[in-house]
Image: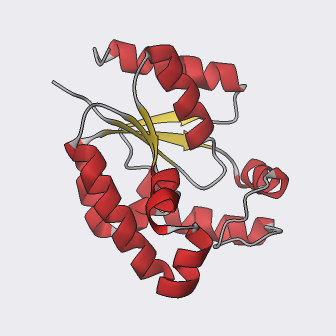
Amino acid sequence: MKLHFAFVGLMGCGKSTVGSLAARRLRMRFVDLDACLVARYGPIADIFAEQGEAGFRAHEYAMLEEIVAGPQVLLSTGGGLLTHPPSRRLLTQVITIYLDVSVAALTQRLRDSAIVRPLVGALPTEQRVSELYEARKALYGTATYRINGEQPLVKVVDEVVQLVRSLGAV
């Protein structure tokens, strides 16, 4: 039985970093949903500007559908994927792992990042990050598992590796 694993959480929580490192240790395929979207449709900021969030979520859903139908994977999702009901329903077919990080830590990570996220801009404020966090917190809370994403990176990755192995996925 193939088990897909999808990381969920607000932008900047470490989904891509943790996912790629854990996949390497587990010798599993890693897919970054945002990277797939960029490869197929162009920069995320451009998709938002030209098609709005609804257009972006439609592309995101189509890509997610392809991935879930394919071979076993560790998947990094976009921070807002769970806000789209069809995507949320599709994720019920996979094991979800919520990387929980505080608003203050998320804000600092986003400020330190070279990536500009359309929903928070080039200089994210704690107020804006808090608004997104509060709006999505209940959705993230529906994840199958929760891991404290503020621990040292190696500890977060260790927990993911142990979890995947404990479920017999590798």
**Measured along the vertical axis of the image, is residue 29 above or below residue 25?**
below
Instruction: Classify residue 115 by image quadrant.
Output: bottom right
Residue at the (55%, 31%) spot, across then down: 20
Residue at the (64%, 71%) spot, across then down: 131
**Measured along the vertical axis of the image, is residue 72 above or below residue 53?**
above
Q: How many marks?
A: 0
Q: Quick one: 73 or 142, which is closer to the camera?
A: 73
Image quarter in which the C terminus is found: top left
Q: Position of residue 62 (x, y in %)?
A: 29, 63
Could you tell whether 156 is left or right of 126 in the image? left
Residue at the (51%, 55%) spot, across then down: 34
Instruction: Classify residue 114 by image quadrant.
Output: bottom right
Q: Position of residue 165 (x, y in %)?
A: 37, 13
Residue at the (29%, 19%) spot, across then down: 169
**Measured along the vertical axis of the image, is residue 117 above or below residue 111?**
below
Instruction: Classify residue 31 by image quadrant.
Output: top left
Q: Quick one: 158 or 31, which is closer to the camera?
A: 31
Q: Position of residue 89 (x, y in %)?
A: 24, 58
**Measured along the vertical axis of the image, is residue 140 above or below residue 58?**
above
Could you tell whether 30 is left or right of 58 in the image? right
Image quarter in which the N terminus is found: top left
Q: Position of residue 110 (x, y in %)?
A: 76, 56
